[in-house]
Image (spheres, coloured by chain):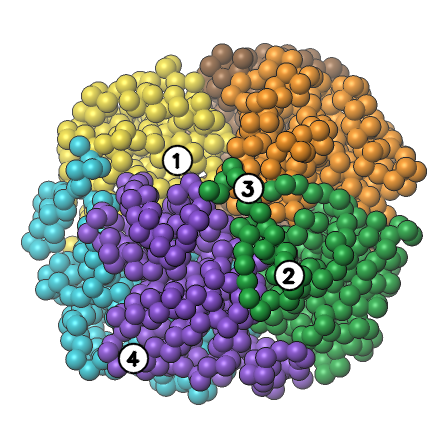
Chain colours: A purple, B cyan, C yellow, D brown, E orange, F green
Amino acid sequence: MRLLLANPNTSQGMTDQMRLLAQAAAPKDTVIDARTAPHGFAYISSLAESQIAGAICLQMLADAPPPDAAIIAAFGDPGLAAARELFDFPVIGMAEAAILTALQLGQRFAIVTFSPAMRPWYLASVAALGVGERCLGVRTPPDHAAQVADVAKTRRQALQELALAAAQDGADVVIFGGAPLAGLALEMASEIPAILVDPITAATRQALALAGTRGQRLTRPLAKASTGLPDALARRIAQQTPDPLRHS
Amino acid sequence: MRLLLANPNTSQGMTDQMRLLAQAAAPKDTVIDARTAPHGFAYISSLAESQIAGAICLQMLADAPPPDAAIIAAFGDPGLAAARELFDFPVIGMAEAAILTALQLGQRFAIVTFSPAMRPWYLASVAALGVGERCLGVRTPPDHAAQVADVAKTRRQALQELALAAAQDGADVVIFGGAPLAGLALEMASEIPAILVDPITAATRQALALAGTRGQRLTRPLAKASTGLPDALARRIAQQTPDPLRHS
Amino acid sequence: MRLLLANPNTSQGMTDQMRLLAQAAAPKDTVIDARTAPHGFAYISSLAESQIAGAICLQMLADAPPPDAAIIAAFGDPGLAAARELFDFPVIGMAEAAILTALQLGQRFAIVTFSPAMRPWYLASVAALGVGERCLGVRTPPDHAAQVADVAKTRRQALQELALAAAQDGADVVIFGGAPLAGLALEMASEIPAILVDPITAATRQALALAGTRGQRLTRPLAKASTGLPDALARRIAQQTPDPLRHS
Amino acid sequence: MRLLLANPNTSQGMTDQMRLLAQAAAPKDTVIDARTAPHGFAYISSLAESQIAGAICLQMLADAPPPDAAIIAAFGDPGLAAARELFDFPVIGMAEAAILTALQLGQRFAIVTFSPAMRPWYLASVAALGVGERCLGVRTPPDHAAQVADVAKTRRQALQELALAAAQDGADVVIFGGAPLAGLALEMASEIPAILVDPITAATRQALALAGTRGQRLTRPLAKASTGLPDALARRIAQQTPDPLRHS
Amino acid sequence: MRLLLANPNTSQGMTDQMRLLAQAAAPKDTVIDARTAPHGFAYISSLAESQIAGAICLQMLADAPPPDAAIIAAFGDPGLAAARELFDFPVIGMAEAAILTALQLGQRFAIVTFSPAMRPWYLASVAALGVGERCLGVRTPPDHAAQVADVAKTRRQALQELALAAAQDGADVVIFGGAPLAGLALEMASEIPAILVDPITAATRQALALAGTRGQRLTRPLAKASTGLPDALARRIAQQTPDPLRHS
Amino acid sequence: MRLLLANPNTSQGMTDQMRLLAQAAAPKDTVIDARTAPHGFAYISSLAESQIAGAICLQMLADAPPPDAAIIAAFGDPGLAAARELFDFPVIGMAEAAILTALQLGQRFAIVTFSPAMRPWYLASVAALGVGERCLGVRTPPDHAAQVADVAKTRRQALQELALAAAQDGADVVIFGGAPLAGLALEMASEIPAILVDPITAATRQALALAGTRGQRLTRPLAKASTGLPDALARRIAQQTPDPLRHS
């Protein structure tokens, strides 16, 4: 089993940490092919950055040897729907996987993250799935921390209080969203009276669950020529072969 | 790893077939504790039967040794939300697992099943998840087959045509729903230009993905005395301990 | 006119009080056949208990002589959709009747009840009807009272304040939900600047409104054999006769 | 008990027929104060006509002696929300009452009416209640009959076929909408394998169910002066007394 | 270019102020035919008043020479859908235009207005468009000002604070709704960290954008005789000519 | 007035044609700065291509001199939400503008386009706005034309029949979507009994309507460093200045 973990952020440290968590969530012989975005942003926090990083992510998926399943390793899932159109292997989104996991563990969930700057992007993920009624909100500290990398430590108490409040408001499940909080759910499990979900763990488990699913899809996009795209991605897009049943 | 596969139908043959499929979808050392409903219906096909079989299913879950995760092995998921309130281990629904799998594999899915009698119940499962906009319908032959057990063979051509039509209407994914169709998706994979989902396989994979997730939940129901209930179930309901933070 | 009032809780005192309220809401010559669940829970307060009590309720409806209409006398409506599939007489739910009444009396309504433990179950009733946008929430005291039976008295002030706050937030109508609050809306009518709805009164009135409606429905479930079910219920399920127009 | 039946159409014959049906649906001693619009349209069939007739209907309600409950006797419910703001007695809409009745009798309903010209207006009524998912459409003959008054006879076969098709498509309940079809549901009950709902009967029963409900509402509109309005209506609007708790 | 600005309120001063703002938002040679309701209410603040004023507004549109586009100049859009059925020229609603403008300028918007009495009516406008998920509420001072005309001055600070709070809660755009606040968005633009929308400006711009759009619509209402209606309106309704393709 | 028309496709001919239509829809002195994507696809027809072209489009908007308003000139609106976060000038989407125009001209609209391959992408635009209930579908010929550029001519009859059928199904408005159909709505206006909307005309008019709207938004993304991005785009993203009120 080989999983591609594509971090659309440019932070190698973040990739390393997520690789460790993914490895821990998978059988020992699973190969985690963890890759960091060749360019872009240290961490994505807006729809605009997601638009750009999503395109970079398609390039990363095209460049890598085809895995059994791929994970787009940023909460917010840049490029997810696009990747599913293009590639034959299953593609997992971290936010989507965490939310689908939460839906299977309780009636209502909340998302706790480290900065109010992430809220619009994360809310869009919830809305995209159409499960807004079961979400008790994206809850964050009131302001943005200057140092994002170690925010799980510097803001630990605030994050714990947010998770506790979500449980008291009726959340069966709390998701800790955002790469800088990767692993926090595992660490804080005994402190919060709710089921905690770690998105990278959830995404790895979903990747294992869907690995190997394939199919000749009539709904593939048309084969398309392009200019100026990275080679592997251009080839992938050019190879999409429309089905004779549908397109003349 | 030990998975409880609780078939809320009384058909032992159905249980045996689903156990084989579950075993095939899991690592070799996974123990599948497959159980058949002690009483009720040979197969469930209505909301009324689901109300009754759901209560029986809670009894089955209380009677079994606590597994790492449990599967309610009837498409339609009788008793699913109730079971999640009561038990500490994750509980997976066959319809829900199949639908969540489909959502991760494409934009639109369709459900194909063997009888129009199943449609209202299956539509309720889709609506319960709030993903109706991505579902291209529950598609069935026009009438109900007298012999349900071997319907995957006797109606094979009709089912194939329904799946093909769903693909042509834009379904990326087709789910074959209903216990009598267990395994059909695996068999027909090369014949339909769409990704096919087998619900028992999907449920087993989801059970493996969520196995071991636990948490002290503030949202557990109050401990409650009861009369006339099967022993293990009554004990389980009586043991629900409300959290001091929330209830006086 | 004969109405069946089936209390799916085992509290005879609750049944007696609801029978009095139902009798007061109906013409004098109306017979109220009030029955208490033969086993189960003193009062239902969770989805799990509702799953079990809903099945018991089907048994109660099958055991009684067929009425002109039946009321499932627990806010939360355990077994409601199932009962409508099975029986020829109209079946009324207390929560649904109260909500449909509220929708006809104003633009927005709120539900006030006695314990936060009821909230998830009641919210599910509102969501099931699809009218969440017109509901200003399920409002409760912050904690659960140890003695539920007399909570209408011991928490009277808190309940009054919750109803008043709902009116000030824009609720045209306030529903007092939960059997222990039966009758409170009638008592408190002059104290709250909103229209107050008593669910048992509303359900009785809806039962009278729909009494006698019948029809040969093509959408009845298939006739079905069963094992281990109470006699009358098993017979009812076995007698469901599919229509030749639809099922082969 | 006195019910006001306000026909916002100018057809006296239609009023007479609806009065008979209302009388038949109510206890013998119920007084039906049936009134015909003093001006406007012979029958309403558009949003534009509904805007105008709704204002006329408010005038009719203000002119009549206050009843125990009022029925706006046109499917489409012109002026319904407005009337509920203005008057202390309950106001029932024919479409809304029929739909709420249908929701209590089955999972899915369809509306059959006599002309495609009615469809947009009736669809708006379904959408206004937020129950579109449970509606299998507004079904009509393909063209508009020149003579509307006797369309229940001249198009009987087409209407029967539409109702039958709705039942076969899964409708538990079929509503015959539109004043020219008043009573048809009662007549055709034995011919269609579904529960048939007659809107004027349903509205009368709902009026009886809600009769007498009142309340000092904080949500009443502000008292307001006006010019050029019919006297009684102007007085009613001027008498709306804001509550000191809410408005300075 | 000639725009009809129909103020369904009877306040000439309000009409004058809106005409100035409309003129300022349009090219110099645009003729603004501003008209005040001949009777009705000084300002509309409820669904009931909107029902009546909407009918008056149809009369105003029928009485005026046909413009290139018309604006219904009251936030809440009385008679909007009705007018679109009846008239060949485009009809713009102030609330709808402001909301559609806001949707094109950001992800989330809030509406700030001068009195809690307006909230139900304005919320209905948001719900009618189906964009409730992107609206952060209708925000108002806690009580109703006795003098409405100069409320933009007397409550300036409260309104500014409400807009600021909306921006802090994540609103990209803030709409100042209600005729007495006309122009406030232009005045306060530099004080609030959000994009401010002035409804009369937005409506004028939309009227210019749609001016001249016409079409022979199959969906026009049937031609209809009437009694007691103002002459021009009656003629307009009588002239609606059904298309031979659709109606027999 | 200067409008930026950014064609995210690489077809210069398409840009030229859209520039002519935009110029015709605007006052004479309007400058249309029409630009063609420097690389990418001849025409976009999938979510995957939209992900990539959306990122290219952000680059185009950053490279151009800031206009009074910008149009993303591809039905499907690649990069629209992202662009609105990043730029101070209003950004208009062709699909969104056409749909918002249609909503203001009638109750229901349909989209007609040239190929079934466009349907999933266009449906996503409708769903993104949340107005699916008012859309009668994306209607297309059954198969994909090999030559896309002149499809407005080669498939004229099929497109006309689709528009006519939409009108007969109740569409007040028909949008001709897709760059190869630009201008067809103007040409076919007298042939179809519905209001026809040309997306580039609608987008130009919306751009004129919103031009000049600006605001210091608290909701701007954080300023962010990046690597490997085109210069102007990187500078734009780096200049996003968070507001001191919200971010520490």
Residue type marked 3: Asp
Give the image location of residue E60, x and y in percent: 81, 29
- Give the residue displayed 29% in from the left and 56% down from the top: A184
**Residue A30: which disc?**
4
Q: Quadrant of residue E224?
A: top right
Given the image, what chain letter belongs to the residue carrying mark 4?
Answer: A
Foreground tag (3 vs 1):
3
Give the image location of residue A190, x and y in percent: 19, 52
Give the alpha-carbon distance from disc 1 to disc 2, as whole Å: 45 Å
Q: Is residue B156 left or right of residue F54?
A: left
Crowding at label 2, few (<14), some or many (≥20) Cα neighbours within 10 Å? many
Q: Which residue is mark 2?
A: F233
Given the image, what chain letter belongs to the residue carrying mark 2?
Answer: F
Give the image location of residue D167, x and y in percent: 48, 58
Given the image, what chain letter belongs to the residue carrying mark 3?
Answer: F
Label 2 residue SS:
helix
Q: Which residue is mark 3?
A: F243
Give the alpha-carbon distance from disc 4 to disc 2, as whole Å: 39 Å
Q: Is residue B22 left or right of residue C192?
A: left
- Give the residue displayed 26% in from the left and 81% down from the top: A29
Residue type marked 2: Leu
* Circles 4 and 2 on the same chain: no
Foreground tag (1 vs 2):
2
Give the alpha-carbon distance from disc 1 to disc 4, as whole Å: 47 Å
